[in-house]
């Protein structure tokens, strides 16, 4: 019996070619366009109308029906509320990861099942395979486009219903397939920015939802280790051990609000360095939430920007079971990073600590550490510190 697959069609070339390939393989294919953001749908940064037109045009060329569904309420409740909470707490979240697990492979999947789908497909660059009764998430063949990092929170039920038609293709091949089959979006540039919110001035956007509280940019004196100081200053008020124990340093500028900055950030600090000849460039290395201070240091390879370990919380393992701690793995602490050799030093329920063979640059609380065993994505967690 022909399998019915509902394809998430965004108007881009990847999802369009996914639908085309499935149709050619004999599946009964239905396109489904998701609308997930409504707050400023008519401004210059929201392209949902244009994207819908592109999706409908592609579906017409492919010869499949297409529908539209609105998940704006689910997105705001499950993804955007978390996004704001994390930024408000001084962390840097990755909404694309939650968007996949909560919207594309939950709200969308549930809707597709109501449409009578046997499976869903997306334009992600990743693979899924079944081994010994378990579904594995694998890296795509195109290493430069692999999106398994963003999919690492998917579970067995979600993967069992997922098809990734582009996992074995290069991006250039996808565009060529689209061109040969007359898809008008074959040269459409890839979308970037916040998942479903689009490309927009980030500080201006975030300022709509979070209060602005300017404060000092503070630089520790040379040779000062601020790690213990920051641990004691992560709460809303200084920890007892940190009161009156500020390390030596100086104020070098003013920040516009801690939520607007991320660890490792260089651009937009406005305190010189680098190009103007005043010395090495400045980088953000920490946030003192208790004192509303942005901690900055000079030099890309400053010791404060390099760490050999991290702690992670809110762990999720694709198989449903944690991997062992007696062997080495690869891990990414950000998208597009090469796998870094590491081991899981401690594993206690929903928490784990990771130790890397080589120091990692700008480990960022709120981002995800994702663990790999070769090409197999095992899962990961949220970086706590």
Image (spheres, grey):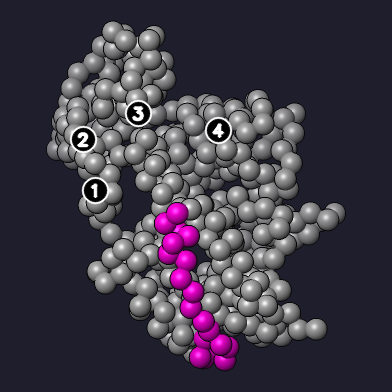
Which quadrant is the N terminus positioned in? bottom right
Q: Earlier in the sequence, mark 2 or mark 3?
A: 2
Residue 267, x across and y down, in percent: 25, 43
Q: Residues within 10 Å of mark 1 (few under 14, many from 20)?
A: few
Q: CA distance from mark 2 to mark 4?
A: 28 Å
Give the label, 2 or 3, closer to the camera: 2
Residue 39, x across and y down, in percent: 31, 63
Mark number for residue 213?
Answer: 2
Residue 193, x across and y down, in percent: 37, 58
Q: Where does the magenta region start and end?
A: 59-77
Q: CA distance from mark 2 to mark 3?
A: 17 Å
**Could you tell me which residue is drawn at 54 percent across and 29 percent down?**
311
Residue denoted by label 3: 286
Mark number for residue 207?
Answer: 1
Mark number for residue 227?
Answer: none
- Is residue 290 rendered magenta in the image? no
**Could you tell me which residue is drawn at 74 percent across and 41 percent down?**
321
Residue denoted by label 4: 312
């Amino acid at each position: 019996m022909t399998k019915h697959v509902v394809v998430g069609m965004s108007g881009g070339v990847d999802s369009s070619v996914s639908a085309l390939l499935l149709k050619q393989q004999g599946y009964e294919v239905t396109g489904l366009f998701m609308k997930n953001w409504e707050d400023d749908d008519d401004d210059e940064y929201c392209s949902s109308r244009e994207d819908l037109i592109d999706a409908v045009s592609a579906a017409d060329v492919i010869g499949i029906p297409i529908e539209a569904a609105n998940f704006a309420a689910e997105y705001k409740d499950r993804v955007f509320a978390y996004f704001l909470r994390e930024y408000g707490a001084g962390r840097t979240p990755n909404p694309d990861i939650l968007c996949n697990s909560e919207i594309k492979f939950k709200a969308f999947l549930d809707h597709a099942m109501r449409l009578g789908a046997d499976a869903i497909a997306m334009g992600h660059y990743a693979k899924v395979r079944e081994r010994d009764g378990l579904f594995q998430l694998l890296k795509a063949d195109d290493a430069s486009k692999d999106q398994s990092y963003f999919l690492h929170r998917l579970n067995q039920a979600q993967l069992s219903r997922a098809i990734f038609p582009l996992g074995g293709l290069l991006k250039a091949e996808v565009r060529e397939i689209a061109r040969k089959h007359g898809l008008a979006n074959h040269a459409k540039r890839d979308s970037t920015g916040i998942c479903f919110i689009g490309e927009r001035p980030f500080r201006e956007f975030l300022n709509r939802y979070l209060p602005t509280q300017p404060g000092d940019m503070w630089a520790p004196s040379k040779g000062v280790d601020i790690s213990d100081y920051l641990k004691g200053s992560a709460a809303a008020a200084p920890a007892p051990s940190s009161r009156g124990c500020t390390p030596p340093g100086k104020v070098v500028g003013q920040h516009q609000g801690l939520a607007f900055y991320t660890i490792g950030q260089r651009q937009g600090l406005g305190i010189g360095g680098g190009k103007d000849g005043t010395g090495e460039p400045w980088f953000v290395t920490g946030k003192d939430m208790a004192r509303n201070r942005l901690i900055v240091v000079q030099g890309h390879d400053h010791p404060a920007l390099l760490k050999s370990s991290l702690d992670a919380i809110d762990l999720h393992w694709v198989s449903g079971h944690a991997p062992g701690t007696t062997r080495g793995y690869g891990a990414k602490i950000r998208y597009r990073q090469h796998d870094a050799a590491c081991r899981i030093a401690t594993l206690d329920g929903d928490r784990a600590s990771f130790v890397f063979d080589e120091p990692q640059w700008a480990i960022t609380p709120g981002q995800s550490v994702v663990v790999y065993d070769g090409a197999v994505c095992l899962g990961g967690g949220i970086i706590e510190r």
